Image: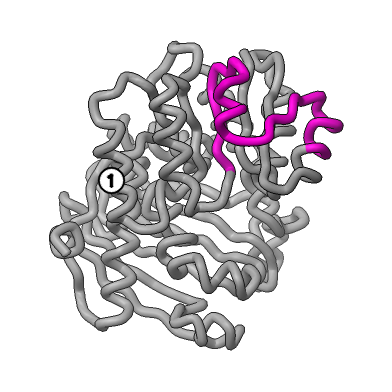
Amino acid sequence: MRIGILGLGRIGAFHAETLSGLDAVESLVVSDPFADAAKAAAERFGAQVADSPEAVLAAGVDGVVVAAATDAHPGLITACVDAGVPVFCEKPVARTMAEGVEVLKAIAGRDVPVQIGYNRRFDAGFVAARAAVQSGELGKLHTVRSTTLDPAPPPAAYIAASGGIFRDCSVHDFDIIRWVTGREVTEVYAAGGNRGADFIKEAGDADTTGAILTLDDGTLAVVSNSRHNARGYDVRMEIHGFTDSIAVGLEDKLPLRSVEPGVTFPAGVPHDFFMDRFTEAYRAELLAFTEVVAGSRPSPCTIEDALEAGWIAEACTLSLHEHRPVTLEEVRQA
């Protein structure tokens, strides 16, 4: 099949490399506002360069991967759907929830699949955790713990435009909690602090946060996030049931150091970047998209899924600023 790529920054170029290695993909058509980025991708992967999203859609593509700036997501998603071309778009759907809801309304009833990029759904550990929950082998759940700790903050310009740590970082935890447990979040309580980079505090954001999510069956999910984790990129999940408990991310590249006598785990070089931690998940995610394009599977992460994670982020952001519990129903009605 022939796949278009819109946006060739860090993640777009990474997707181009991944797609070029998939057996199902015969050719790429790439476009980026910066001509040099498109030219470099064309030279590296033998891709055709198009000078606009419209030109990509006119080039006979079977599917499109959107890795452009967030503000462009709504227009590009709807343009692909209008053209009848299946689309994979990196999260978020839009800069704001209101815009995301408008995208959902705009494509409602259209028989063109849209897949949003939440790569943890394709990580082997998280896949196994979901299967364990679904099989009932853990018994009834009572506690979930989900962690995302970045090794260092992103640039100040990114922070200023990100919408805050809950919207751009914790949202991955929110999505994977919903996906693994199969439950919805009803209420949140969030707290945060600033012990590191001044530019994060100046942007009105926190650099370290904790949130307690109440799920619709009473299970409690505890989410921990930070922009500062000197030992590396730490993504983990624990799922505790009345019959058994399991963990995702307890492997030799875990960026933690044990101080227990005689303990040598973990023994590997710690993960230091999200692309290192989730290389195989990204590949599986795009492989799934080729199956969506081929019509052999439905979208594994719909716009509706992405918006649900977004509502949790909205509730946590409000809770952080107002120092109180917030229900999901409240933010939906705001």
Task: Report the residue at 36% width, 34% height from top.
Answer: 302
The reply to whether the magenta stretch includes residue 7 is no
Residue 120 percent location from the top left of the image: 50, 43
Residue at the spot of label 1 = 102
Is residue 130 in sight in this rendering?
Answer: yes
Task: Report the residue at 62% width, 22% height from top.
Answer: 3
Q: Residues within 10 Å of mark 1 (few under 14, many from 20)?
A: few
- Give whichever of 236, 171 is nearer the camera: 171
- Give whichever of 12, 189 is nearer the camera: 12
How many marks are shown on the rendered structure? 1
Q: Is residue 143 above or below residue 194?
A: above
Is residue 258 in sight in this rendering?
Answer: no
Residue 209 percent location from the top left of the image: 43, 74
Amino acid type, callout 1: Glu
Q: Is residue 186 above or below residue 212?
A: above
Task: Report the residue at 76% width, 43% height from top.
Answer: 35
- State the quadrant of the N terminus: top right
The magenta stretch is: 39-67
Q: Is residue 121 above or below residue 259?
A: above
* Left or right for 260, reference 179: right
Residue 48 percent location from the top left of the image: 75, 25
Q: Is residue 267 above or below residue 20?
A: below
Dividing the picture into quadrants, the one containing residue 78 is top left
Q: Tag 1's secondary structure?
A: helix
Task: Report the residue at 49% width, 65% height from top.
Answer: 162
Q: How is the image coloured?
A: one colour
